[in-house]
Image (cartoon, rainbow, N blue to C red):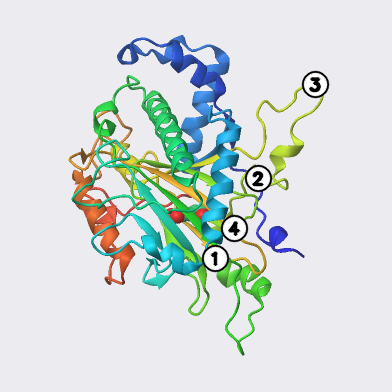
Amino acid sequence: MTHEELTEDVGQVPVIDIGVLLKLLRTIDEPSHFDRALLNPQEAACLTQIADSYAKWGHFHIVNHGVPEDLIQAFREHTTSFFDLPVEEKKFIKRNASNSRGYFNDEFTKQKADWKEGIDIGAQDGSLEGTSEIDGFNQWPANPAAFRPTVTEYFEAMVTLSKRLLQLVAATLDLPLDSFASIVEAHTSYLRLNHYPPFTPPAGQPVDLAAVLLSEEFCTSLAAPPGVIMGIERHTDAGLFTILMQDTVSGLQVWKGGRWHAVISPNNATHPYHSQGSAETPLTAPMATAFTINVGDMLQVISNDKYVAPLHRVVVNPSLHRYSAPFFFNPAYASDCAPLDSTHNATPCYHPVNWGAFRRARFEGDFADKGVETQISGFRTSTAGPPPILE
Ligand SMILES: O=C(O)CCC(=O)C(=O)O
């Protein structure tokens, strides 16, 4: 049995073709006057699918998102070339406690060192230039030469797509499309490039990785058993939502219904999506360019628990390199995120969360073992009850 098969999911996480809604958004002159009742049946079905996926899974895959395929391919190639550099060269641009932008190979999640390396590139006050008190400044590698222009172009494409997706979030909540525009005008999003090298057990301590990954204990315990190395331990994303590019190697898992499920991207040829097309009804999107969307903590707060940020993690792979690129779409630092009046729960489940303060506390925990991580559960109101879990 291969590693891919070991971690294969049941293919339930929807793959949503959002082309029909993006086309519509481009034609709407006054987002504040958006009327859901005027959607045609195809548009309405797509919006319902998005709303249901946010509520049921907290994540889904999108195709036909408008990001050019050649840009995605160039971005991928430069990501791989960057990580292929000698570690000494990558460390020229290493991030530190006073600058969160740059290369790292020492991140902690749940007080455990991740089995991965990465580079963070961020926006400050809505732009890729400049510096911010919380994040510092971007550090670009000298090699590969085209890394900076390609990553910059990809970053801008992610911003454009994120703003569209945020309009759709508003639409799913029966709000005008521009309801959240002010909190992301000076957005503080960042792009993370991840490389998970193949896991090599320490000499003299052989690990039967397949047995570990298949064990009932591993699949049903929230925390990975002691001694099991993870690509990245369980966490939720802190911001509004994440646009995740996964390559063809699996590893991502999500906690739902009391166990971990593998989340295979449609970019992987084993995904059931590939068998859905036919000569009569061909698939509408090119493959290898799907993105996975994850609800983040701030959207959970704003939606007052209607949309729950999924707990996710990444398992190691014994033989394959895995690359991924989450784009964390984040509000302005000055924003206070608070439950909207119009969401399904009349009583607010959260006190307002200042994004700048929250992000600063999270970064401090990423950089070193600070004991307890800052979580939105700390902002729950006394009447809200226990934090929601995806059932
Ligand atoms: O690599 C992935 O698929 C997910 C990465 C992730 O969760 C993170 O970087 O926060």
Location of mark 2 (residue): 11
Q: Residues within 10 Å of mark 2 (few under 14, many from 20)?
A: some
Of mark 4 and mark 3, the one earlier in the sequence is 3
**What's the CA distance linking mark 1 and mark 4?**
24 Å
Residue 97 in view of the camera: yes
Mark 4 lies within 8 Å of ligand 1 (Cβ measured):
yes
In the image, residue 248 sits, relative to residue 218, either above or below, namely above
Residue 6, located in which quarter of the rendered image?
bottom right
Q: Residues within 10 Å of mark 4 (few under 14, many from 20)?
A: many
Pick the quarter of the image with the N terminus.
bottom right
- Which of discs 4 and 3 lies nearer the camera? The answer is 4
Of mark 3 and mark 1, the one earlier in the sequence is 1
**What's the CA distance linking mark 4 and mark 3?**
35 Å
Location of mark 1 (residue): 220
**What's the CA distance linking mark 3 and mark 1?**
41 Å
Of mark 2 and mark 4, the one earlier in the sequence is 2
- Which of discs 1 and 4 lies nearer the camera? The answer is 4
Residue at disc 3, secondary structure: loop
**What's the CA distance linking mark 2 and mark 1?**
19 Å
